[in-house]
Image (cartoon, rainbow, N blue to C red):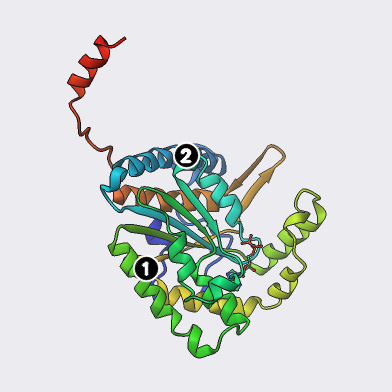
Amino acid sequence: MADLRDLLKVDPGTLRLADIDPRATPGLPSKRTVGKDPKLWSAEAVADISTELGSYQEKLFASAKEGATNRRVVLLLQAMDCGGKDGTVRNVTAGMSPAGLKAVGFGPPTKEELSHNFLWRIRRALPPSGYVGIFNRSQYEDVLVVRVHNLVPDKVWSKRYDEINAFEAKESSDGLTIVKVMLHISHEEQKKRLLARLDDPTKTWKYNPGDLAERARWTDYQQAYEDALNKCSTEATPWYVVPADRKWYRKWYRKWYRNWAVANLLHQAFGDLNPQYPPPDFDVAAERAELSKAA
Ligand code: ADP
């Protein structure tokens, strides 16, 4: 199967979001290849991948024990409202231990956060060595919502792309693997999902009347996303755009291309990292003999 990273990676300076179909399913194998309906296959694949992610996570944790390495992994998700960040996190982390996960959501900065550089709260939220971090929104909000709403002058936000690149380069040379994913939905799909929130009492809590004002700025947001991804997709920390409109829904199942794609991207990043259980730093045979004698 083709490396999904090659299909979804942003080539710096060349991304045009309008050219990426949010309903596309790049890399999803055909029925002929997998011998069954690819929708069903993808859900089984997500379950298998998430079990393997759990095993990778444990090895990462074990290998970093007692400060042996500073390896850490962050899955960073950005999307327009209703893009599916929460559902993706639920599915992709299903096989992982909550004890080794550090999930953080970034909302409007607090007064204290605003008194520091915008990266201050991001640095504090980075996972410790051996942990997997989930960023639900991120440092990129400071060149997205902040730019669209002119929360700081142009000359301040426009310098932030370089600051973000320098920050990510430094952290990645210090053991951090960052998998940056934009879940790409269409304007129409967002409307459907917002309406679904109003129609379903179990989802109404997710609706915020402010979402409509944000939706009205759709074009500005798409432009801000395009610039951020074009300027901050680097060799060490590339951006991936995952088409995220596509779900297959039946009474008895819901399947999402995006879950499969994001799980895969994280799995491939872990594959490169290839964490291993550390060898024991004590004499196993002696311990076994001692334990066998003990009461
Ligand atoms: P989500 O929509 O991700 O489920 P929330 O409903 O808590 O979570 O929304 C978070 C809100 O915080 C979003 O509207 C986002 O634009 C805003 N936000 C995040 N970071 C910043 C920032 N640096 N400055 C201003 N607003 C921000």
Q: Which residue: 27% across, 15% down?
A: 291
* Amino acid type assigned to the residue bearing label 2 in the image: Ser
Pick whichever of labels 1 and 2 is earlier in the sequence.
2
The circle drawn on residue 97 is 2
| Side of 3 where 101 appears, left or right | right
In the figure, residue 221 lies in which quadrant?
A: bottom right
Residue 141 pos. (x, y %)? 54, 72
Q: Which residue: 60% across, 50% down?
A: 87
Quarter placement of the C terminus: top left
Q: Which residue position holds label 1?
A: 168
Please determine whether, in this image, residue 132 is positioned above or below residue 146. above
| Side of 192 where 72 appears, left or right | left
Q: Nearer the viewer, residue 270 or 68?
A: 68
Q: Nearer the viewer, residue 27 or 129?
A: 129
Please determine whether, in this image, residue 11 is positioned above or below residue 73. below
The Cα–Cα distance between marks 1 and 2, rounded to whole angstroms, is 26 Å
Disc 2 crowd rating (10 Å Cα; few below 14, some 14-19, many 20+) is some
Residue 71 pos. (x, y %)? 32, 52
In the figure, residue 10 lies in which quadrant?
A: bottom left
| Side of 9 where 249 appears, left or right | right
Q: Which residue: 32% across, 40% down?
A: 62
